[in-house]
Image: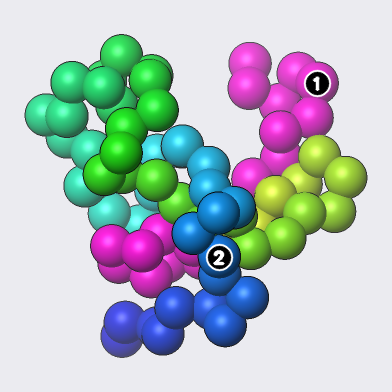
Amino acid sequence: MRLPIDPHADRARRAWVACPGCDDTRGCEPCEQRRNCPEHWRYLISNQGPRVHLQCPNCTHTWTLDTGRGAWG
């Protein structure tokens, strides 16, 4: 079921990370080169320290990502 866009979503607060709910960046050159893409961005809903809460405008999936030191391998 597709969720509505979070009411706190603001286009001015964006993040450029892969969505775990859809594969919308496949074949996108800027995304594959890990550059900011004007088309494939995520809403940055809120954060709690290094944990950010995101929503994909494409599939409306929401998730939390830990951006703290060492969290990205």
Q: Earlier in the sequence, mark 2 or mark 1?
A: 2
The image quadrant of residue 63 is bottom right
The image's mark for residue 10 is: 2
Location of the N terminus by quadrant is bottom left
Q: Which mark is residue 8?
A: none
Whether residues under marks 2 and 1 lie with C-beta atoms below 8 angstroms apart, the answer is no
Instruction: Give the image quarter of residue 25.
Output: top left
Image point 55% across, 54% down: which residue? 12
Residue type at numbered disc 2: Asp
Total marks placed: 2
Q: Secondary structure at mark 1?
A: loop
Question: Residue 22 location in percent, x, y?
Answer: 27, 54
In the picture of the structure, the residue carrying the numbered disc 1 is: 69
Q: Is residue 63 visible?
A: no
Most common secondary structure along the magenta stretch: loop
Disc 2 versus disc 1: nearer the observer: 2
Query: How far across and how far down the image is residue 58, in percent?
Result: 28, 62
Q: Residues within 10 Å of mark 1 (few under 14, many from 20)?
A: few
The segment highlighted magenta reads 55-73
Q: Is residue 67 left or right of residue 20?
A: right
Instruction: Work out how far the residue at label 2 is from the one at label 1, CA to CA, in angstroms.
Output: 26 Å
- Asked if residue 38 lies left or right of residue 43, the reply is left
Residue at 31% x, 14% y is 33
Residue 53 in the magenta stretch? The answer is no
Q: Secondary structure at mark 2?
A: loop
